[in-house]
């Protein structure tokens, strides 16, 4: 009888873990396929409609395939081919890169802070990066060419991330209330700086500031993609290399140290990576909030907290979300484009409130 009870308890204990492993084994392939399909349809939808077969045919033709398979062809309208390669492909690819950067940054921040509410936009890191970029825009600085804005955004994001990290730590952990209040203070301060820049800016800089505040992919180009791509690759590589240590850190600082993790060194390294990822996205698309909060949370609920899956799945899932969000933003209103940051805030804001209430109920209060 005792053996029977023990076996049933073991079955009950291992069942959720087995289900999560099954989900994890199919999650990345499903997200990848969904992202590819979404990109093909997003590239074909617009004022000059292009079928998925024509989109694929254009890619194959550009890769050097002189004879296309029967199912694929070049766009019948020559304008369609030009539109694909000069406007839509850069925009869709930028959505993928920025989505991956924000998703990876969100997953890392939640691991570094040990807090499910940590996200670049919520705690002010994105706005800090934006202030860095605004500084070079308003004062016309172009020392590093195409890299100037990205470098300034990186410095602003890094300073803000270190500031938030320092203030949110108490007794070896980050507290929910401190994190949120720090984010409110940082966003208020950056809002004041942005307001000052708006006051002293000329018409050209004002347009750039408005674009950044609302968030948009309309300024995407192949030149900006070649700036974002290396930053993303470096960030993803470091994040994946640190996944195992993040899993150990989730056990607590003391157990992680006993298992050989240099906790402070790991946190500082990942804070720099977060700043790099956020800066690469914010530098050319403006502030796009909540993407790095919603997707990592959903991935964690589906497949568990292991960072070896959480980091890449959050990156691919966030890319999928941003591609679809941008498609909606530029098609939902005829002949106009809804600001992307507004759309993501409309979806992510209620989700943030839900997480806030859930965290409060589990903690039994705000302390």
Image (cartoon, rainbow, N blue to C red):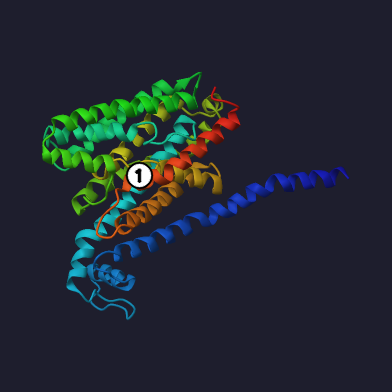
How many numbered marks, from 0 up? 1
Horizontal and vertical percent for residue 29? 47, 58
234 on left or right of 298: left
Whether 83 is drawn above or below 262: the answer is below
Can you see residue 284?
yes
Horizontal and vertical percent for residue 217? 26, 50
For image coordinates 26% across by 35% down, the residue present is 130
Front residue of 124/228: it is 124
143 on left or right of 121: left
For image coordinates 28% across by 44% down, the residue present is 215
For image coordinates 33% across by 40% down, the residue present is 277
Q: What element carries label 1?
A: helix
Horizontal and vertical percent for residue 8? 78, 47
Quadrant of the snapshot with the C terminus: top right
Front residue of 179/205: it is 205
Horizontal and vertical percent for residue 80? 21, 69
In terms of image quadrants, where is residue 147? top left
21 on left or right of 11: left
Whether 64 is drawn above or below 71: the answer is above
- The residue sitting at the top extreme is 171
Name the residue tied to disc 1. Answer: 101
Quadrant of the snapshot with the N terminus: top right
Whether 364 is drawn above or below 107: the answer is above
- The residue sitting at the front extreme is 334
- The residue sitting at the bottom extreme is 70
10 on left or right of 152: right
Can you see residue 241?
no
- The residue sitting at the right extreme is 1
Which class describes the residues within 10 Å of circle 1: few (<14), some (14-19), or many (20+)? many
Front residue of 198/79: it is 198
């Amino acid at each position: 009888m005792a053996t029977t009870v023990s076996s049933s308890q073991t079955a009950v204990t291992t069942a959720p873990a087995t289900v999560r492993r099954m989900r994890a084994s199919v999650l990345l392939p499903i997200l990848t396929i969904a992202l590819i399909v979404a990109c093909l349809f997003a590239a074909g939808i617009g004022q000059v409609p292009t079928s998925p077969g024509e989109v694929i045919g254009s890619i194959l033709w550009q890769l050097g395939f002189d004879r296309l398979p029967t199912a694929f062809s070049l766009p019948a309208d020559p304008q369609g081919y030009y539109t694909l390669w000069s406007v839509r492909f850069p925009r869709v690819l930028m959505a993928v890169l920025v989505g991956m950067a924000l998703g990876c940054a969100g997953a890392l921040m939640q691991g570094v802070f040990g807090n499910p509410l940590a996200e670049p936009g919520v705690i002010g890191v994105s706005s800090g990066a934006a202030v860095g970029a605004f500084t070079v825009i308003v004062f016309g600085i172009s020392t590093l060419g195409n890299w100037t804005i990205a470098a300034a955004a990186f410095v602003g994001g890094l300073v803000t991330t270190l500031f938030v990290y320092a203030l949110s730590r108490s007794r070896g952990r980050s507290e929910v209330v401190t994190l949120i209040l720090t984010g409110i203070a940082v966003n208020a301060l950056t809002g004041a700086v942005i307001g000052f820049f708006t006051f002293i800016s000329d018409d050209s800089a004002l347009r750039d500031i408005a674009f950044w505040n609302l968030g948009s992919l309309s300024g995407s180009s192949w030149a900006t993609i070649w700036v974002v791509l290396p930053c993303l690759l470096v960030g993803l590589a470091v994040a994946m290399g640190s996944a195992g240590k993040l899993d150990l850190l989730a056990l607590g600082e003391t157990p992680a140290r006993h298992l050989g993790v240099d906790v402070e060194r790991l946190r500082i390294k990942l804070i720099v990576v977060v700043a790099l990822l956020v800066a690469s996205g914010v530098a050319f698309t403006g502030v796009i909030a909540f993407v790095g909060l919603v997707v990592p949370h959903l991935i964690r609920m589906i497949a568990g907290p292991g960072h070896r899956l959480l980091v890449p799945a959050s990156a691919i899932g966030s890319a999928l979300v941003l591609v679809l969000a941008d498609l909606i933003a530029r098609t939902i209103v005829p002949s106009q484009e809804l600001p992307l940051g507004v759309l993501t805030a409309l979806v992510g804001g209620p989700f943030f409130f839900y997480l806030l209430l859930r965290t409060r109920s589990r903690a039994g209060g705000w302390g």
